[in-house]
Image (cartoon, helix red, strand yellow):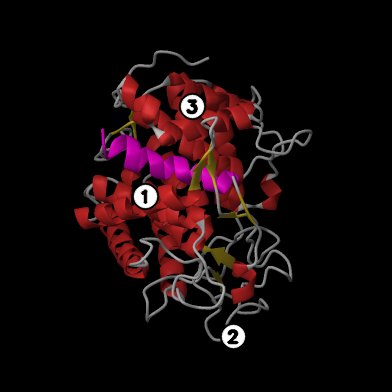
Amino acid sequence: MIRALVTASLGCTARGVACLLIVATPLLTAQTKEESLTLHAANQAMVRWPDGHISPRGRPTAWGFELGIVLAGMNSVWTATNDPMYLDYLQHAVDQFVQPDGTIVSYDSQAYALNNILIGRQLLTLYRATHQEKYKLAAEKLRQQIATQPRTVSGGVWHSRTTPNLMLLDDQFMLAPFYAEYAATFHEPQDLDDIVKQFALLEQHTRDATTGLMFHGWDESRTAPWANVSTGTSANLWARGMGWYLMALVDTLPYVPEHDPHRTVLLAMLHRAAAAVERAQDPQSNLWYQILDKPGAKENYIESSSVLMFTYALGKSARLGYLPKGYGIAAARAWKAIRLRFIRTAASGEVKITGTVTHIALGASPADDGSYDYYLHAPVVDDDPKGVGAFLLAGSEMELLWHS
């Protein structure tokens, strides 16, 4: 069990990188902790999914992005509170996979799935906190996957081996923050060229000239059934896809040195994406619709994980000075609306995160066709890992850090 850690720093291994506290000074009084909705949700997630077992009872949990988003949220709660029980949870969740020699149980490097990269961020966190070599060795395996990942003709990394030439907005959150943090930790600044290139390819090919928002996916070969034959893009501006992308920018920037020219490029991308997202914020609900540019269209609705991702990204960007403070105000309006719309508290005190879309996987099968109906008729459930993880991220910003 990890206990009483001294203050350490993220990203300070690279010259010029602003140091972010991996273990923050305690920010909450006992009274605030008792009242915190975010901490209620985090504590209940640890009970619901002991040691990171997010799969239904009797089924093994997979190493992948759904556990990764839950752990990202839990990491943010730990950073905000300095309570070691959240770091303990991270360690136990990761240790169900990582063997003493760094082997990762259930991880298949030859699948080349970018969804498998996200938990790498927790490997780096645990390596710094414990100095256990197994976490570094496991992280090296993920970094090796990136090095050998199949790529498009223009150099964009494929979503997976089974989806040739496909790039998704989602993938940037799976890939870029780990890639950048690894580069900062192990002194590999040359990787910033490739990291920025992946963002740039998506912006260049998926950005809608009218709204500034970004289409969910891009097939460089333009041969996928769902792809526009002229541009290769998918047909819709899906909110959660844009949320993944925006969070990726915000979580990558801390690992780029202040005076590095790549930082200027990424900040410009963040400003363009955030401005488009803010314009799409519905003035009546203060939230965002599932299909971002069609708020009044038939059957279009507001989904929880996407609006939580926007709230986190805009709030964190404003707090860290990447964006003007007005974006923090937009995030605060959304956070208030989210609590009223998507948070249900039972008489027992149990907090449920409602209204999260489960399966969206553009291009994974013929049914995953990226059509308007596809996004609007995917199953919606309570306490989905993506919704819970996004809630912990947003809550850590809006409830624990902004108001500390």
Q: Secondary structure at mark 1?
A: helix
Residue 46 drawn at (x, y percent): 56, 29
Task: Name the residue nearer the viewer: 174 or 342.
Answer: 342
- Residue 98 sits in quarter: top right
Region in magenta:
383-404
**Going from the N terminus, do you reach mark 2 or mark 1 first?**
2
Q: Disc 3 to disc 1, how far (Cα)?
A: 30 Å
Q: Disc 2 versus disc 3: distance between alpha carbons?
A: 45 Å
Depth check, mark 3 against mark 1: the one in front is 1
Circle 2 packing at 10 Å, graded few (<14), some (14-19), many (20+), is some
Q: Is residue 83 left or right of residue 259?
A: right
Three-letter code for the amino acid on which mark 3 is drawn: Leu
Q: Is residue 366 left or right of residue 146?
A: right
Name the residue tied to disc 2: 229
Task: State whether the magenta stretch is mostly helix, strand or loop.
Answer: helix
Horizontal arrangement in the rendering, residue 196 relative to residue 100 (left or right): left
Tell me the residue at 31%/49% (across/down): 315
- Three-letter code, disc 1: Trp
Q: Which mark, by number, is residue 126?
A: 3
Residue type at mark 2: give it: Val
Q: Is residue 397 part of the magenta span, yes or no? A: yes
**Tag 2, which secondary structure?**
loop
Task: Name above or below for residue 23 compared with residue 292.
Answer: above
Q: Identify residue for label 1.
A: 335
